Image (cartoon, grey):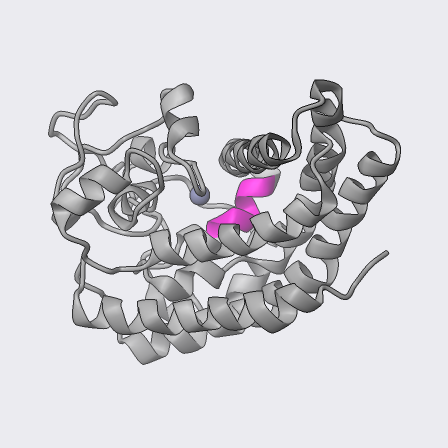
Amino acid sequence: MKFRFPKFDTVGAPLLAVLGVALLVLETRRQLRKPTQPKQERLLQNASVAALALPALRLLLLPALYAAARWSGKHRAGLLPLLRLPGWLNNIAGFLLLDYSNYLWHVLLHRLDVLWRFHNVHHIDLDLDVSTAWRFHIGENIASVPFRGAMMALLGVPARLVVVYEFFFEACTAFHHSNMRLPWQLEQQLVQVVVTPRMHGIHHSIVAQETNSNFSVIFTFWDRLHRTLQLHVPQEDITIGAPAYRNLEEQTPLWLLQLPFQKQRAWKLPDGTTPERASESGRHLPLLP
Ligand SMILES: [Zn+2]
């Protein structure tokens, strides 16, 4: 199995670090949603969770996906070799299919109880900012290996494309988790194609039908295709997190690590009520400020 990805490590990773810092500065200067906890505290908390998840991503997930793509390339297995597309079109189709497979994986994370236990660690963050983009339980990254590896083999995407896609996947994840206020008109245009901070903010809402929408990672097409797009929620009305996990004190790094193995709480606020939104919602309605 190949573990060395020199371009990813010497160009991709430093670029991602620069992007992360730039987003951190921008989201501090131009806030989209009002944070509930001090920034430094959150950075420390989320960095502790990421300290386990990121090595798993680089040392296990990336080599495994690359190996699966190499295997399918060697055997000319999977969908893309059957289509015999010209090189450039094969790369575009591969990139889109990889993104679609990650939409499906994200839906599974929400639909299957065993996966939600891990993904919940990401969702119970009480604020949403660039640090949330790396706050994933190590178990979620490990659990994604069989699914995403199988997708590589089924799709037959070129192995090099897997590494390129992973770079854009991480860059877009950092962008749409950030708490940066983009001009609304610009974001209205952007959201036609790519996932934006306002769109993903709705996915992190404590209202269940909003959390169960907007699963796309890079392109918004997949939510449109599956009618899971939800843009018509004002950002100032969104409470970030999960209703039964509102206590900041309990969210220590060790507790977050153990969370998937504990009894999961029902989707209810501490007073026993279920968060709902009275205002009009619908897939056909536009993005709100
Ligand atoms: Zn999610």
* Of 257 and 108, the residue lying toward us: 108
Q: Position of residue 263 (x, y in %)?
A: 54, 48
Quadrant including the C terminus? top left
Q: Residue at x 44, y 28 (%)?
A: 222
Q: Residue at x 48, y 49 (%)?
A: 120
Q: Quadrant of residue 237?
A: top left
- Whether residue 13 sits left or right of residue 80 in the image: it is left
Q: Position of residue 33 (x, y in %)?
A: 18, 57
The verdict on residue 10 being magenta is no
* Of 66 and 113, the residue lying toward us: 66
- Whether residue 34 sits left or right of residue 91 in the image: it is left
Q: Position of residue 60 (x, y in %)?
A: 74, 58
Q: Residue at x 41, y 58 (%)?
A: 174
Looking at the rendering, the stretch of residues picked out in magenta corresponds to 115-120
The verdict on residue 117 being magenta is yes
* Of 4 and 51, the residue lying toward us: 4
- Whether residue 171 sits left or right of residue 22 in the image: it is right
Judge whether 193 appears above or below 14 on screen: above
Q: Work out whether residue 144 can be spotted.
A: yes
Please state the total of marks drawn on the protein image: 0
Q: Position of residue 95 (x, y in %)?
A: 56, 38
Q: Residue at x 36, y 35 (%)?
A: 214
- Whether residue 229 sits left or right of residue 73 in the image: it is left
Q: Main secondary structure of the magenta part?
A: helix
Judge whether 164 appears above or below 95 on screen: below
Q: Quadrant of ligand 1?
A: top left
Q: Quadrant of residue 105?
A: top right
Quadrant including the N terminus? bottom right
Q: Work out whether residue 252 can be spotted.
A: no
